[in-house]
Image (cartoon, rainbow, N blue to C red):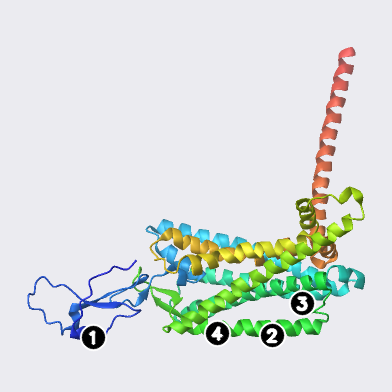
Amino acid sequence: MGMRFRQIYYETCSTNFCKNNGQCYPLNNNSTTNVSFSNISFWGCICQPCFTGEKCEYSNNIISLSLTSAMITDIRNAGRPSQKTAREFAFVFVTSLLVLVALANNILSLLTFLSLKDVPSDTLTKVRGNNQIYLILYSVYGLIVMSELEIRVILMLFKIESSGYQFYLCNVAPVFGAMMVHLGLWTSALFIGERMLYEIFNIQVISTTGRSIIINIIVFVLVACSHIHEIFGRRARPDPLLPGAYVCTFDYGEQYFNNIDVAFTIIHLTGPCLLHLICSILIIVRLIVTQKGANRAHIYDANQQVPHVWRHVVGEHRDFFIPPLLIILCALPHFLFAHLMVHCIEISKTDYLRLHIALNLLVYIPQTITFAIYVYPNKDYRNLYAKSVGGKFIRRVCCCKRTLQSTETRSRSDTELSMFNQVQRDNNVDENKQKR
């Protein structure tokens, strides 16, 4: 937090040279009794929280750091070279692991959803095949955002200081990554929204592929336009902890830009989560009512309690509820931490810096395990996956492994059997010699 001093104003300080709402105050000079305060060198600044520097020109707020900038800051905070190497390895390892999982999940999901075009009409109705475009785009967004994240983290290790690299790392990559994450959130929200309308009201909003493409183009344009201001708002500023180094942070200059940024962040994070929550509740209520109505036809089921019916409905239709639940649990924590709970945390607080990094990475989890949340819980999608190119390839690889293991087992058994037979023959020969 910023220090508070008794405010003393002189004519020289009528024009405040302090930035970021810093307050001008006279510096003490014990060696001089008659101080001429007309000399600007005798004036200093009381900085607001999370700002530092002679004129409060440097921001050291964790919340304003992008993901890779937060990683770079944590690495720079390390005291010994061995600690820096360990932190670099940890960040690259975790990110690479997430990217590998994302590549496998999204490629298998993409191949599964692309195979919907060859599905008979009756099966297409069961799996809601008209959502094909949404599911394909969700997988594509997942591939793009995770690949871009891996590129950023790898480039982070080279410590490039060129202006072009700084512009990419600060003004382009984080904005593009955030846009892909938000597109994924809205795509998944519109997907469950369409399913809710169909299940409850039998309304097919996306009755044709052309209509779904138009809707997705509109969503893409709106989300992209809402991130344009970030390109101009991000700045590579001198790192207050390491002279000569730079760190990417927000610096809009004008308060209304900050308000716009906060408003768009709230819309992109809470909007999809709220839509997921509302649709999930409506679908659960609808399925419970339907299940209770069906139970009235069977006396032995008519007295079932609502909690029992609720568990049965959620278990049977888990493919409806797993994606919304996971998306809400992964998207909201960082929003609550960075926008509602705290607004200013100084970079020197390492624990909060790492929490900021961890919650940032948590946002990427739903787009990392697309196959696990959309394909695997749904029996019809699993059947489509088994018939897809990816499913056939995985099955062939697994079958080859099993065949190889079976061959090795048989080979070992044959070897052991031949050795046993050889021992038996040798024993028989010895016995015959003894009898003679």
The answer to whether one can see residue 244 in this image is: yes
Label 3 to label 2, Cα distance in Å? 14 Å
Residue at mark 2: 218
The disc labelled 1 sits on which kind of residue? Ser
Label 4 to label 1, Cα distance in Å? 37 Å
Q: Earlier in the sequence, mark 3 or mark 2?
A: 3
Q: Quadrant of residue 194?
A: bottom right
Q: Which mark is residue 228?
A: 4
The disc labelled 3 sits on which kind of residue? Ile
Q: Earlier in the sequence, mark 4 or mark 1?
A: 1
| Residue 167: x %, y % from top left | 48, 81
| Residue 210: x %, y % from top left | 80, 85
**In this picture, residue 137 sits left or right of residue 31:** right
| Residue 98: x %, y % from top left | 62, 62
Considering the numbered disc 3 on the image, is that residue within a helix, a strand or a loop?
A: helix
Label total for image: 4
Q: Which mark is residue 14?
A: 1
